[in-house]
Amino acid sequence: MRAKFFLRVVSRAILVFIFAVGLFAGSFSRYSYAHQFRELPNSPPSAAHALGRDLFTRLFYGTRVSLLLAPAAALLATFIAAMLGGIAGLRGGWIEKVILGSADISMALPLLFVLIALRALLPLDVPPLFSVIATFVTLGLLGWPSSLRVIWAAARSLRESDHILLARGLGYRNSQILFRQILPCLRPVFFAQFWISIPLFTLTEATLSMLGLGVMEPLPSWGNLLRGSEDFAAVAANPWRLVPLFVLILTVICFQFVFPASEELA
Amino acid sequence: MRLSQRALYPFLALCLSLCAAPRAFSQSGGELHFCLHNEPKTFNPILVDDEASENVRYLTGGVLIRANRQTQALEPALAESWRVSRDGRKITFHLRKGLYFSDGTPFSSADVAYTMKLLMDPQAHSATGDAFRSGEGAIDVQTPSPEVAVVTFPNLVAGLERLFDQVAILSSKSPKKEMSVLGPYYVSEYVAGSYVLLRRNPNYWKHDADGHTLPYIETVRLDIQRNRDIELMRFRRGELQLINRLDSEQFDRLQKEFPGVARNAGTGLDGEEIWFNQNTASTVPDYKRKWFQTTEFRQAVSFAINRADLARVVFDGYATPAFGPVSPSNHAWFNASLAAPKHDPQAALQALSRAGFRFQDGNLKDSAGHKVEFTVITNSGNAAREKMATMIQQDLSEIGISMKLVTLDFPSLIERISRTYDYEACLLGLTNTDLDPNGQMTVWLSSGEDHQWNPSQKTPATAWEAEIDKLMREQATAPDEKVRKAKFDRVQQIAAEQQPFIYLVNKNALSAFSREISGASPVALNPQAFWNIETLRLKPCGEMGTSK
């Protein structure tokens, strides 16, 4: 237990540091994230980007974009999944079938193609920040079905439990049962889905950047910084290109340890 | 013990023959292995319109006249000689005798007539055939004898002979149809999405100076591989012996790792350019279209772009700042008198000032007070273009222009630039396969679909476009090459003054050859690395791939 506590404290400290770096990126670097040091392309840290842009400055500012927007998208997706999964699990019957069917159809749709189609509809002349927000909102709106399945399964297992039967017997309405009985019991599941979704959305953003749907230049994000790791040989020659990947991995690991496990809570 | 003089001669002859034998035999045969970067859409040479199919056509197709990729001169191929009439409408071919297709079918003038008929059939929608269309009316092909074919066009076709470099002759009699070929190889196997296997054409007509049958290499295996990193990895492992069209970053690394393996053939034909949407039917706001239609605005953007930095940073120095529509490697048509593009933000601001723009507090505003900002689209997944756009973004910010970059998937981009015209500016590349200016006709004629900045105009929108129209039509109908050159030089000069396309860089032709290959001599023209496939040889085993 002490080891877990220690890990939790360390994880929280790391995350606070990473968030602080993102929020106060300007204080950590004296360079602009967009300025190109063209005489120094691919130079060792920190002016390490292919265009001579300072990699660490871009990482600091990219942290701001990714760590604020990926959790926001994860929150949106988990919220939609929680609502729909909770309702499906509680009500059963045709409502359950409709919701699960919708989720199945959504999962069957190739997400990237849907996003490409949506990007094609978006006006070209939008500020980069709007484009970023639109990207993550879209991810949140389209990323709920896989979480829904998990949440629905957990909610269904509660449907016949004693306290729900008792609540029904006491005359609670379905909405009251959902918000007071089902959803609070599923909090650990929501957390798990939320934490899992953050790296997923960050990586999806990286993929979208490659398709031109992600964060637009010159704004940095972890996603478009990870593009520097595509080329294995280039990474071998300039290993500091992997720093954004390490930060992403570290962040994801820290997210897993930052809150106590359900058995600890019990 | 001494050898007598009589015995010495046979001994020397034996030694010499033993020395020569490995060269004659061990360097023939073998399998050359390299990649196509896309699936070939067709093996029918008439219908080719993509690079992968074009490469297969080059390797398998027999043509009447071949443009030597190194000297850029025309050379006899299936036709021993040819003659173009004074009016430029008729070409007479004298064919080689005793030639056979890969399946043994004899070759004659009837095959030339058959091929030309298929090529010019409007139903075929052949891009190769379109280059021959000079006006209304059908072509006429006469075959007075099996060795003579006379092709007559309804109107003059400028640069007629050179167009036949793209026309692979089909057999009119073979049951194998287009799979029966006259080129150095024939398609032996094809597994969609995986590979194309080519085998040496046993009936190929060419021989080397020593009388050996060409090509030397027995089979060519073309793996379909889109991922360039995997291609490079396989080359490093010795699984591939050649890489055509290497990108600059890979070239640089390969050169450091294996000196001598990566080869730079100098400035290539491929260029990159940016243009503004001047189309009146587009959704571009009127005040922005007015900027784009202003010559000084386009000139200012051109002055502000640091092309030398683009070439150095994005292409690691393996590119040349671009002058105009013709690459310097196109010796016949490049206008060498054009001034080199220069990076001069002050000249840019002066040009803008002349056109009524004001530079205030780091921002540029037009005479009506609109902040000058526009969005450039380019295709996603092309790292070099994205880097160029990002650098241009910074260059333009120096003269107060705010440029946004949007990357789109290729179909969406094509939809916008060719159908909906819903874009402000675009950055794309131009691949030139044809050296002759007639290949650029649809780009320069104001009525052309590829006249990207303002396509399909009923009448030219500007005086300089009208002048280009006139010059392009005149050069296309001028039988004298010098007159054609003078007229196309003027077109290049107008393009440099007006900047409808702001040319950025011409990329170098980069390729890589493993040490197993001898005879490699890459060039700027397509297909850069294997244009001389017939004379490439593979060394005997023991020297693997790129191993040092």
Image: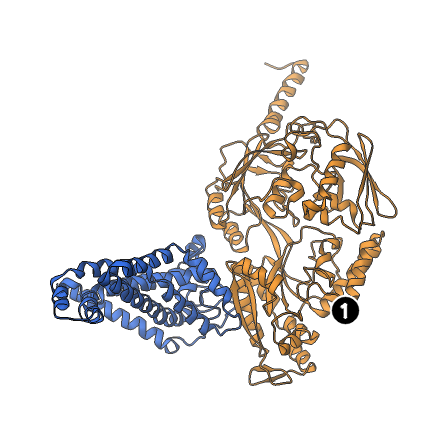
Chain colours: A blue, B orange
Q: The C terminus of chain A is located in which quarter?
A: bottom left
Q: Chain of mark 1?
A: B
* Picture quadrant where residue B451 is located: bottom right
Residue depicted at 51% across the width and 52% down the height:
B250
B309 left or right of A266? Answer: right
Callout 1: few (<14), some (14-19), or many (20+) C-alpha neighbours within 10 Å? some
Residue depicted at 25% across the width and 62% down the height:
A192
Q: The N terminus of chain A is located in which quarter?
A: bottom left
Give the x, y percent position of residue B289: 65, 74
Give the x, y percent position of residue A32: 45, 75
Q: Which residue is mark 1?
A: B464
- From where the camera sits, is residue B265 visible? yes
Foreground pick, B84 / A152: A152
The three-letter amino acid code for the residue at tag 1 is Trp
As displayed, is residue B382 above or below residue B286?
A: above
Residue depicted at 52% across the width and 62% down the height:
B408
As displayed, is residue B102 above or below residue B441?
A: above
Foreground pick, B344 / B360: B360
Foreground pick, A238 / B110: B110
Residue depicted at 80% across the width and 43% down the height:
B139
